[in-house]
Amino acid sequence: MAECPSSSFIAHLRSVLPKDGTREALITSVIPTLLESIADVAEALRNSHHVAAAGTANSFGDDQLNVDVTAENLIRSAIARCPTITTASSEEDPVERRVQHTTPPPCPSSAPTSEEYTLAFDPLDGSSIIRANWTVGAILSLWDGPTALHQPPATAQIASLLGVFGPRTTAILALRVPNSGLAPVCIELALSADRAWHVATPQLALADTARYFSPANLRAAAEDPAYLALVTGYVARRYTLRYAGGLVPDVVHMLVQGEGVYVSPVTAGSKAKLRRLYELCPLALVVECARGRAVDPVDGRGVLEREVRGCDERGGLVCGSAGEVGGVVERLVEGQ
Amino acid sequence: MAECPSSSFIAHLRSVLPKDGTREALITSVIPTLLESIADVAEALRNSHHVAAAGTANSFGDDQLNVDVTAENLIRSAIARCPTITTASSEEDPVERRVQHTTPPPCPSSAPTSEEYTLAFDPLDGSSIIRANWTVGAILSLWDGPTALHQPPATAQIASLLGVFGPRTTAILALRVPNSGLAPVCIELALSADRAWHVATPQLALADTARYFSPANLRAAAEDPAYLALVTGYVARRYTLRYAGGLVPDVVHMLVQGEGVYVSPVTAGSKAKLRRLYELCPLALVVECARGRAVDPVDGRGVLEREVRGCDERGGLVCGSAGEVGGVVERLVEGQ
């Protein structure tokens, strides 16, 4: 494993990020190191044939799988090689802590810099489908400064990275750097056999309308007539159903198809399950950078309009093609 | 690529197949060679980052992807190394033809034998989801004798093999050898980094009832009140939705969870899409070997009770946990 990873997409990153040197570590160290950790997780999963309970639970009380623990450790060890990531927390260990760095590698990117980042990550999203060998993902979210809490997500969360572990290994990188004068980007990357990342799609974009729908937490429709009507409405209009039950594959399906709507409502009888810091904010950035919308199904407000006040905050999610998301807000929020 | 593949699961196969030598080539040559072709397809997919139209169509008029063609070629070249597979056809080239073998390898398994098999296969099932990097599969079906047509599927189709291309590479092997005195088996295999196959689960089994449902071709519910009522009934009873839109991942999810029901109905406005020879028969054998049921949604008859009379025959499918399949037959067939 190279300590100073570099590959063909760095030239692409340089073309989309500020040229004034203020994001040098981000380009040459942080993002390459995080991508390297995604390659490490992919390799570990490829050989994890005994998916089993680790016999432990995370701080939320969720049972941990051995592969959750492996992915967590691989990403933590990548962070430790990256001096500008000073703070980190994860869904498996949801407390922001200062990073204890290993000796900085003799790499130009480790030169003194004013950059300082916080990483919030979900090392392995999709525990319920990993045993069936369905595609799962990792979610990494990068914030400016020494914490992700009590910050304005729309500007403080500058990057989000999804690892997609399927028949091949791909990643989605969303970048939105304030005051840079650059348009947001949402790039699809692909890992080749020599562990180099390549740009597969320079800009993913969601059309305003869609013909695919992903109804998460569909059991909630048993007690929520508005949600049931929404779903039967999609059926009546002959939308195509795709629902893996993993947030990463479900959102990535929309991005790659260029259209879709994902709905995970919150109802009286079913609590919000998605973590704002580890799931909702990073996914919302990805979707917005692809010209889509991501809103809270309770009040229709943008996911990124509200600060994250604690690592355990949770919510629902409606995201995808902007026009479709608007239609869901009309039915689930304004129709109440 | 070894010409005489062997690995730890052969001992397991020997323990479940007749000891009289009548299936020696099946154990030592046919199944290992087919599994090797699944490993080849997995490796090819891992590096196929430009999934694109091949610019051709198969005989059914479906557009072919470059990865469809690659998978087809890899499996065809495996068959050519296997003297006891004398006939083959595939969804990409749906005409039964005699196999032109390459020089037989100097392998004990190629010794003269009375065994003769026909292979029918779908090299890459799930074209619509491969671009999104979702799990896809291969379906291989092995028949006794020089043809799969006009034979009794329940006894002539002796083995079925699913390749599962996801975060890792796994396979499902179903074997039901008539007059052998052995119970049917449905084995989950896993591919390790050194390209050896290992037994992950010696016997997959579907419980009689389930809490997961997969409603395929859901758009058909727009015009079929019985199908819509079936689906809203699952919602009301709080079944969990899982629907990848790929026959292999959807069936494998049930097998690994040990429960589930998959419904792909046929209605006036939506034609049957699943091929009996390349999809329905092999999946039905897998499900039956896991103690489940697989029936035709038109009349409730077992998929394997009816001969395949042509390579292009199609149908719908209800399969999975036996009690759940019975419930669907009551609602969709008997309720008509």
Image (tube, coloured by chain):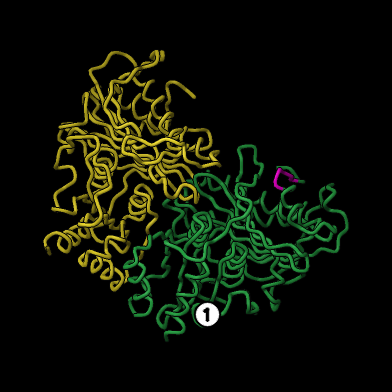
Chain colours: A green, B yellow
Q: Is residue A162 left or right of residue B312?
A: right
Of residue A142 and residue B186, the one placed in the foreground of this image is A142
Of residue B11 and residue B100, the one placed in the foreground of this image is B100
Residue bearing mark 1? A300
B165 is higher (above) or lower (below) than A78: above
Residue B298 x/y as whole percent: 16, 53
Query: Is residue A294 something that shows in the picture?
Result: yes
Residue A183 x/y as whole percent: 70, 62
Query: Is residue A91 something that shows in the picture?
Result: no
Label 1 amino acid?
A: Gly
Q: Residue at x 65, y 66 (%)?
A: A120
Residue A55 x/y as whole percent: 50, 60
- Quadrant of residue A216 within the rendered picture: bottom left
Q: Residue at x 61, y 40 (%)?
A: A192
The stretch in magenta equals: A5-9
Q: Is residue A1 left or right of residue B61?
A: right
A83 is higher (above) or lower (below) than A329: above
Q: Crowdedness of circle 1 by 10 Å Cα count: few (<14), some, many (20+)? A: some
Of residue A37 and residue B267, the one placed in the foreground of this image is B267
- Quadrant of residue B120 within the rendered picture: top left
For the C terminus of chain B, the quadrant is bottom left
